[in-house]
Amino acid sequence: MTAVLQILFDALSLGSLYALGALGIALIFGVMRLVNFAHGDYISFSIFALLWPTTAATTILFLGQVPPAVLIPFVILIGAGVSVLSEILVFRRLRDANPATLMIASFALGFVIKNLLLMLYSSRPKSLSILPGLAQQVEIGGARIPLLQVVTVAATIVILIALTAFLKRTRFGLEMRAAAQDFTMARMLGVRANRVILLAFAISGMLAGAIGLAIVVQTGTADINMGLSVMLVAFIATVIGGLGSLYGAVVAGFLIGGASVLMQVILPLDARPFRDAFVYALVIVVLLWRPQGLFAPRTAKQRV
Amino acid sequence: MTRAPSIMAKTVSTPLILIAILAAIAIAVDAFGSGPLARTVIEMLIRVVLVVGIWIFVGNSGIISFGHVGFMCLGAYAAAWLTIPPMLKQISLRGLPEFLLENQFPFWPSALAASLLPAVFALILGPVLMRLAGIAASIATFAMLAVINTVYSNWSTVTGGTSSVIGIPTVTDVWIALGMASGAIVIAWLYAISRSGLALRAARDEAIAAQASGVNIERERLIAFVLSAFVCGAAGVLYAHFLGIITPDAFFLTATFVALSMLVVGGINSLSGAVIGVVFISVIIQLLRWMERGVQVGETTVAIPSGAQEIAIGLVMIVILIFRPAGLLGNREIVWTSRREPRVARTQPAE
Amino acid sequence: MTLLAVEGLSVRYGQLTALRDASLMLDEGETLFVTGPNGAGKSTLMKAIAGVVRPAAGCIRLGGRDITGEAPETIARLGFSMVPEGRQVFGELTVDENLRLGAGMRGDRAGAARDLESVFESFPMLKERRDGAAGLLSGGQQQMLVIARALMTRPRLVAIDEPSLGLAPLVIDQVYELLLRLRAERRLTLLVVEQSSTRATMTGGRMMLLRSGRVVLEGDARELNASGAVERAYFGYSDAEEPA
């Protein structure tokens, strides 16, 4: 029982990161058909913004030891900022480009951000202890669960509820959902394209910042490539969740997280190093079974 | 194939001009260039093989593939298995089958066999992958790359895991690279004008119409997929014999995106775009390298800060995509007209 | 007063010219039918006015203001409400949300709420289904919804692209009945695209006929139809080479 609980929390906390990442990618894909490969670099950027630029091994916090109440919003705002800036400087100028061009442009942008960080901070991972209070363990149902996992899962649930409320209850949310289904029609009803897209980038960037926080608290290091693996899985989750479906992206994120943790447990010892190979093979199988994704919007484009 | 001769005659100037451009660069660098520059040119020619290989599938089918660098990986490791001296293999790659452990094969037969391995792999996996279209297909090719990378990073007795495989004979020189690049261009051109290539491009532009007129999209895609896997495998072979040392991570995301970027910057829909994209980005990289080392301006040496090179490449790519979203060449091929002047011609309508 | 003036409008898709030198005028309170065979450029004309496609040449004025090349949302905010071909409801949104989306660009919440009530009065069926997904409505109901949604924007001009496409004849009758009633109640200015001229003749109003991207005929719908000019123009006979 305790082992099951531990596995469950492992799966949920890993799935949380994937789900938030997938949501960030799906939000932008929904409104402008951009698969944003720079997303992982937003994650790194929002964390490195905490550090004083130095190529030495020492880590100097930009803001010193600020309380979490300042630190958390700061990271999230940085994420939103870099995301919004990339829309204004790059993607807005590529409105008529095809998805392949957009995708490559986002890759090029990520490349620029990554190398900017490399130039300023070198490739050495920086040890970084923020929110050290989360390092302890708590007892839940007899199992000892890292507090961080509990907080990650709880924070993800709060974020998902808040985002759902935003999308369902507010004017902006309504416009974003409409734009994700049929952008042209939404615009013909007066929905301002640039504003909706900018908002999608802002939320997506905030999610990136939140993921960055979770990773850095968990690993205790800031690494230039820290966002990469989450971004790749999130990207896959977006597709198997059904492109255009935010709900599907979240569920698929949790599913992949769950599948990864589960495989780690059930695969024979010799095969464990190959876990990711099995996960990705599973992705191919899912795509063959449901090329449109698990939760492809059914009614979106249906015509009578 | 009755119409092939006329198409051949009409389009043969494209591969010839592209090969001539590459040959001119190779000859010029061989005659006047330094050692490091020669290495840059070899790298460029290897990239030409890879990007042309990717183009055979992506350019004709319209499906963005993230997986082709995986074929390069298969080719490179196969070349290593075939050509590393048995003594070394018996220490570092003990899990290899007997006949590989005991023997060392010469370059050309090994190169052919090593390129065939990814082609066979593509032939096995292709029938499954080719059923997908659009972004689902792209993700599936990425998953394929991830599977290859995971397996090669962890199958230590056969691939050496994440540590480098060393001892591959470094036989790749400018002329071998030029020859393979030329071969890749000719293969790509022949495929593009073949029945299969024409049918696949028709299906790319008008999927429903092409299917209605009897094009078996999955089969044509598979042909392109296998052929492009072969050429990408050859790029891997060249690469292994160029550096003499390989790791799985050399064939993962960075390589994938650099190759795709070159393709998109050149223009994804034309063979000329694939080749020119590689040449263009390579030239810019080289210029920036020089600038990083410092350029003499009058009395002083001006240098851009180290690390700025990569940033500049990214920015250059973004600027090109903003101003030329369809790539430097758009949908066009470089052709030689009867008026004996190189001209850029439209091979297909814009839509 | 002239509400919409289109002068010398041309639209090209790549090398294909979809619309060539088209002009039209529409006065406030007037109804204009644009008819013509498949591929004549009717939808392209609508999309160009709505700002969805960029014209290669020509000028579009709405209420005296030049809107050529403006963004769709800007044009919508100036009072041009477009109901595109194929009943583009937001299928995953509820009926209520679809309607509220239409009211979004107006500042006054109270007015929007009042309009919503009056729309529900005109369309009792929509009120019944207001919390259901719009994608689950029938074709006719969806057509009603998109018209109602267009009205929620308080438009000066409603443009409807093929309202009868894919609907049963009885349902088409209902749609037109509704349009005519709304026109009378709200003194709407209507721009309606239809393939056939039948509806134009039945409804009455001005009509123009497009063929191969050009305006080939214009005048009072009933008069044109009675004279047989529509039929000849539709099938591409000029007056000189009348069929035997």
Image (cartoon, coloured by chain):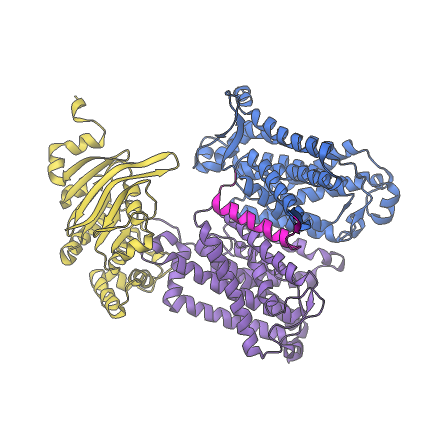
Chain colours: A purple, B blue, C yellow
Whether B86 is drawn above or below A86: the answer is above
Region of the chain picked out in magenta, as a range = B299-328
Q: Does any portion of residue B267 appear in the rendered image?
A: yes
Q: What quarter of the picture does the N terminus of chain B occupy?
A: top right
Give whichever of C144, B228 is nearer the camera: B228
Pinpoint residue C42: horizontal percent, then vertical percent: 27, 41
The furthest residue to the front: B299
Q: Quadrant of the C terminus of chain B?
A: top left
Most distant residue in the right direction = B87
Residue C200: give x, y in percent of width and height. 17, 43
Residue A288 visible in the snapshot? no
Instruction: Point out residue A92 in the picture as x, y percentages from the top left corner.
Output: 45, 54
Identify the residue at horizontal 26%, vertical 46% (top origin): C60
Residue B36 in magenta stretch: no
**Which corner quadrant of the image does residue C196 belong to?**
top left
Q: Residue A31, relative to residue B206: is it above or below?
A: below
Residue drawn 72% across the image and 67% down it: A57
Q: How many marks?
A: 0
Query: Was residue B317 drawn as part of the magenta stretch in this picture?
Result: yes
Q: Is residue C1 left or right of residue A177?
A: left
Quarter of image, res A114: bottom right
- Measured as percent of width and height from the top left, residue B177 is found at 71, 34
Quarter of the rendering containing residue A142:
bottom right
